Image (cartoon, helix red, strand yellow):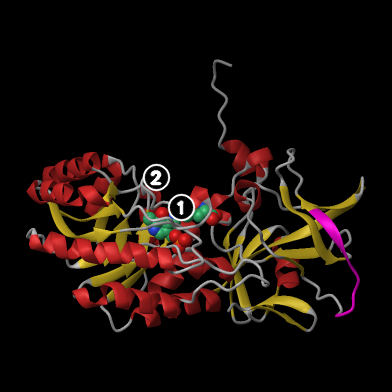
Amino acid sequence: MDHFLYKNGSLHAEDVALSEIAASVGTPFYCYSSATLARHYQLFKEALDPLPNMVCFAIKSLSNVAVLKLLGDLGAGMDVVSGGEYLRAKAAGVPGDRIVFSGVGKTRAEMRLALEGGIRQFNVESEPEMRALSDVAASMGVVAPITIRVNPDVDARTHEKIATGKSENKFGIPIARAREVYAEAARLPGLDVVGIDVHIGSQLVELEPFEQAYLKVADLTAVLRADGHNIRRLDLGGGLGIPYTRSNEAPPLPLDYGALIKRTVGHLGCEIEIEPGRLIAGNAGVLVSTVIYVKNGEGRDFLILDAAMNDLVRPSMYGAHHDIVAVQEPAAAAPSQGFDVVGPVCETGDTFAKARELPLLAEGDLVAFRSAGAYGAVMASEYNTRPLIPEVLVRDDHFAVIRARPSFDEILKRDNIPEWL
Ligand code: LLP
């Protein structure tokens, strides 16, 4: 459920008309609903309670500091994958003991940053990383809490670019080698082994792969405890999928996912962490854009928008589907036609949709891409020197620009012409 609905014939975010925001900030822009973000976070909390748990929002999906503050104020933890994301979490007021640090390539500088600022745990992904972290922590006279990410060799049955739990992926250590790696970790002076971490992929639309992975983690917990490790925390990753099309079969709900967690690992007495990103942010955001031209091509009509692949890369990168709707609600019996929906960027890949059935849109009309809150703004670039587009947050009947559109001056100032040119 989200809070983007037609009211009085016009698409609203909560109680604010998207057309009003467009008139104020210009298009294209991202718009997020506070109520949807909060609700999705609460759904995960309710699904895990009464197990001791922490829902750590995967910042990579939507990293605006205002959004992080909104979730952090509700009690959310944060899952970060870089020093930059760590600093975003801190800037949002999230204490270090609610921040987990994931990622295969943490640098020593990033480790130091997190150890200085406070960290709940590092999710370590390899033996070299484990040794580096122990060195860094020992050199600072502290001990780093860690889990080790195991790769359970489970097929997440999702897009190959976002599956992470197969043995051929770069993530984690093979679960078959876990005992020896944990044994070494326990011997390293700068580490405190607190638990196990697993994440098998993103946009999972069935629960079975999670079940396979979590059962393996439950078995491993028993084995590692028998080896003498004090396994007291399980980080089960993110990955629960969202409906991108209204016709699609609905993916499992957080409540069912929570029940699965309770069934597979709930009896172990461990604190449970999860790292959802997409399910919290995805349907909490839309991308609003204006039709620049309607161009009649050979056997097809192009809807040329002012948004492009640099603003929302998912369709061209993964062939992802985003529903596109007219901001002014079309009449029930209004005629429609198939459009190829494209942006102004100079490559054919800048195509959002082909032969998409839409109302008869015209120059100047507003459209909204649904489900664009996660992996939208965060993956944007300035390709074609198109400024990063603004982000707007709505709460009830008011909105604020939470990231402004940079001016061309600001963009050009970042480049430097050396004096010897
Ligand atoms: N934890 C870890 C260790 C991750 O790598 C990820 C996502 C998450 C949590 C959050 O997963 P989520 O709940 O959002 O599925 N850019 C792609 C998605 C990449 C996901 C990367 N890792 C897309 O646009 O579909």
Q: Is residue 223 visible?
A: yes
Residue at x 82%, y 57% (from the top left corner): 291
- Residue marked by disc 2: 169
Label 2: state its secondary structure.
loop
Q: Residue 367 appears at what percent x and percent y?
A: 76, 64
Q: Can residue 96 be seen from the camera position used here?
A: no
CA distance for labels 2 and 1: 8 Å
- Amino acid bearing label 2: Asn
Disc 2 to disc 1: CB gap under 8 Å: yes
Residue at numbered disc 1: 163
Q: Name the element at disc 1.
A: loop
Q: Quadrant of residue 33?
A: bottom right
Residue type pointed to by label 1: Ala
Q: Is residue 391 above or below residue 55?
A: above
Q: Is 391 displayed left or right of 354 in the figure?
A: left
Answer left or right for 246 relative to 264.
right
Q: Please state the extent of the stretch shown in magenta in the rendering.
A: 332-340
Quarter of the N terminus within the rendering? bottom right
